[in-house]
Image (tube, helix red, strand yellow):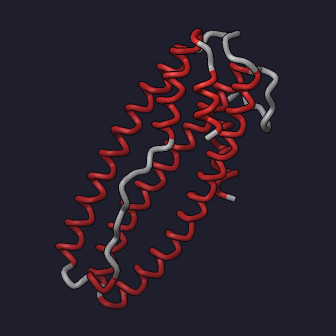
Amino acid sequence: MTAYVYIIAMSAPFADTTDYFGEFLQHAMWRPRAAVREPMSAFEDGIRFRSESLAQIAELDADLNAWIAEGARVKAHLWESFRPGEESGVGAEFLTGMIDAYEASRLKEAMDLARLKKAFKRDQKAATRISSNAGRILKEVDDRLLAYFERALAARLDYALFMRAHRAELDPDAHGGPTFDNPEALEKYLLGVVAE
């Protein structure tokens, strides 16, 4: 609600930035289609299970690829529309709140993903007790699905990095944690925070 009020309250000189920021917010809040992995009880036909699961994961990957590509365009438009001095400290404060909420959501996703990995391991052990082929097929599907989830989480963390960079342009004195000169060090730090 705050974002909507803030954007509407901006004056005419901010029109381009406001439009692009609204587009950015909408894009950043993307919710992918649900990924459904059939339970062990549906594993009667391993070939069908494998083909249907891998087809679903391929569709999810295609959606994610499209979202990432569109995100590059959306972020570029927002960055290009920014002109130093136009936005006030209110914009940086708003962005700080949004970064905190967005990163908290990503942290929850990372914790959910860690629990999912453990559940998949248990299921794979159970499948292997049925047959080695069942265990192998389930592991293949699970590995592909987990790779998709990890890539989606990494892409969302990239949004947090972008928001931090945009906030720094709005308010160079904004402090939200340690500073980094090396992008790889920043990424390692953020992934470490998420993994905790």
Judge from the rendering whether residue 171 lies leftward or rightward of residue 70; answer left or right: right
Q: Position of residue 175 (x, y in %)?
A: 81, 32
Task: State the image quarter where residue 69 is shown.
Answer: top left
Camera-side residue: 142 or 133?
A: 142
- Up-down relation of residue 139 to residue 145 (above or below): below
Q: Position of residue 170 (x, y in %)?
A: 70, 20
Residue at 54%, 26% in the rendered image: 21
- Up-down relation of residue 157 to residue 54 (above or below): above
Q: Position of residue 5 (x, y in %)?
A: 62, 32
- Up-down relation of residue 177 to residue 172 (above or below): below
- Up-down relation of residue 185 to residue 108 (above or below): above
Judge from the rendering whether residue 19 lies leftward or rightward of residue 163; answer left or right: left
**Quarter occupied by the C terminus:** bottom right
**Quarter occupied by the N terminus:** top right
Residue at 55%, 21% in the rendered image: 18
Residue at far bottom of view: 129
Q: Position of residue 180 (x, y in %)?
A: 73, 31
Residue at 37%, 60% in the rendered image: 34
